[in-house]
Amino acid sequence: MRLSKRLKKIASYVEHDAIVYDVGCDHALLSCFLIKEGIAKKVYAGDNKEGPLKAAKANIKAQGLEDKVIPILADGLKKAPYDVDTVIIAGMGFNTLKMVLEDTDIKRFKRFIVQINHQVSDLRAYISDHNYKILEEGVIYDGFYYEIIVFDTTEGRRLSDLEISYGPILLKRKDEVFIDHLNDRKGKLLKILENHDDPKIKEEISTIDSIIK
C-alpha cells in the first residue's frame, strides 16, 4: 500500500498491537496501513464529514479490512470507543487540535501521536502547561518539514523556552533531518531580514546557529 512519507513516519510511532483511533482519517489510508503492516490490532477511522468517510469505507472494503478497520462518523474524540489506547491526530491546526483535546477526558487514552501543520511550539507549550509528558519527537521532509510529537498524560515536567521552540528530544538527538529543518528555517529568516531589520529574527538565527554548532 502506497503511503506518504509523512504518514509512514506517523505510523512508526504506533506501538505493536495498539488499538488506534485515527481522528480525521480522510480516506483511511493510514488506518488500513496500520492493519496491513501488522502494527495495530484494530483501528477506528473517524471523520466528521460524510464525503471522506464514504471514501474511507470504500477503501476499507477494497482492502478487505472491514473486521479490523471500523469507520465512525464523529467529531473529535467524543465518540472514541473505550477500548482505544492510542490516538492519532494529523493535519489539523493547533486551535482545532486544542478544541479536540479539551472536549473530552483525554486521560483515558494511553498515547497521543500528533502532527499539526503550524504552531508546533504552541502544542509543546500546551503539553508543558498541562504537565503532560513528551515521549518522542520526529521530523520528516515530505515536500514540507513536518514535526511529529508523541505524548501521554502522565506527569511530565515544565519545558524551557528553548525546548518549547525546538523540541526537548529533537534538541538532544540533533539528527540530520532536524538540522536540515533548522537550516531551512534559518534561510527563510535571512530572507525576511533582507527587508526588515528585526532584532527578534536576528536572535532566532543566532539561536539556530548555536543549536547546529
Image (tube, rainbow, N blue to C red):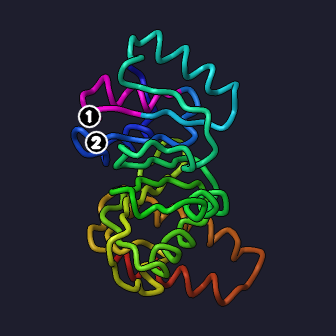
Residue 92: x and y, percent?
Answer: 61, 51
Relative horizontal placement of residue 99, taking residue 179 as reference (left or right): right
Relative horizontal placement of residue 2, taking residue 36 as reference (left or right): right
The residue sitting at 38% across, 78% down in the picture is: 211
Foreground: 118 or 50? 50
The residue sitting at 58% across, 65% down in the picture is: 102
Do the numbered discs 1 and 2 sit on residues whose CB atoms are within 8 Å?
Answer: yes
Residue 116: x and y, percent?
Answer: 55, 55
Residue 111: within the magenta?
no
> Judging from the image, what secondary structure is the residue with disc 2 in?
strand
Q: CA distance from mark 1 to mark 2?
A: 7 Å
> Judging from the image, what secondary structure is the residue with disc 1 in?
loop
The kind of residue tagged 1 is Ile
Q: Is residue 110 above or below residue 51?
A: below
> In terms of image quadrants, where is residue 83?
top left
Residue hosting label 2: 18
> In terms of image quadrants, where is residue 135?
bottom left
Q: Name the image quarter holding the C terminus.
A: bottom left
Please tell me whether mark 1 or mark 2 is closer to you in this view. 2
Residue hosting label 1: 39
Circle 2 packing at 10 Å, graded few (<14), some (14-19), many (20+), is: many
The magenta segment: 28-43
Q: Name the image quarter holding the N terminus.
A: top left
The kind of residue tagged 2 is Ala
Foreground: 201 or 112? 112
